[in-house]
Image (cartoon, rainbow, N blue to C red):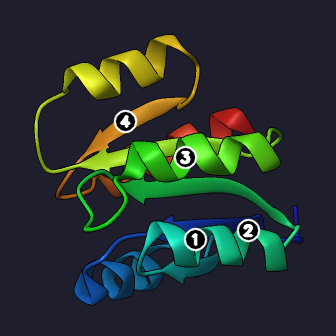
Amino acid sequence: MDEKVTLLYVDDEPINLRLFDLNFKKKFNVLTAESGAEGLEQLKGNPQIVVVISDMKMPGMSGIDFIRLAKKDFPHVRFFILTGFDITEEIADALNERLIHKYFRKPFNLKEIETSIQEFL
């Protein structure tokens, strides 16, 4: 597969965006956004995005709120949540509703994320 898959990573902490980009840019075409609102803009402007990984805790709009909105307009995209905490009821509900495919713990496990994305593709 020479065409790199495009994924969007949404996190309000610039250092996390930078780390994610550094870790995954060899394998994927990485786009980033610092908020749910910016994430929605990225999705609108980049129809090639197939995977979105979002941080859970962000000011203004949580990762789940962002995904709920995004999924309406982009049902073909596969969404994942990243959290520094244990699974919450909100995340469990999102999994049950098939709103998100899986959740990852921070600090992120590169292999786990990569494997999950490859499985989906």
What is the distance, in whole Å, between disc 4 and disc 3 at their CAs? 12 Å
**Which residue is the extreme one toward the left?**
85
Report which residue position mark 4 lands on.
Answer: 103
The crowd level at tag 4 (other Cα within 10 Å; few <14, some 14-19, many 20+) is: many
Q: Earlier in the sequence, mark 1 or mark 4?
A: 1
Report which residue position mark 2 lands on.
Answer: 43
**Above or below, 56 relative to 89:** below
The crowd level at tag 3 (other Cα within 10 Å; few <14, some 14-19, many 20+) is: many
Q: Earlier in the sequence, mark 1 or mark 3?
A: 1
What is the distance, in whole Å, between disc 1 and disc 4 at their CAs? 18 Å
Give the residue displayed 73% in from the left and 68% down from the top: 43
Q: Amino acid at mark 4?
A: Tyr
Report which residue position mark 3 lands on.
Answer: 67
Q: Nearer the viewer, mark 1 or mark 4?
A: 1
* Residue 110 placement (x, y as % from top left): 36, 57
Give the residue displayed 65% in from the left and 33% down from the top: 119
Q: Amino acid at mark 1?
A: Gly
Left or right for 56, reference 10: left
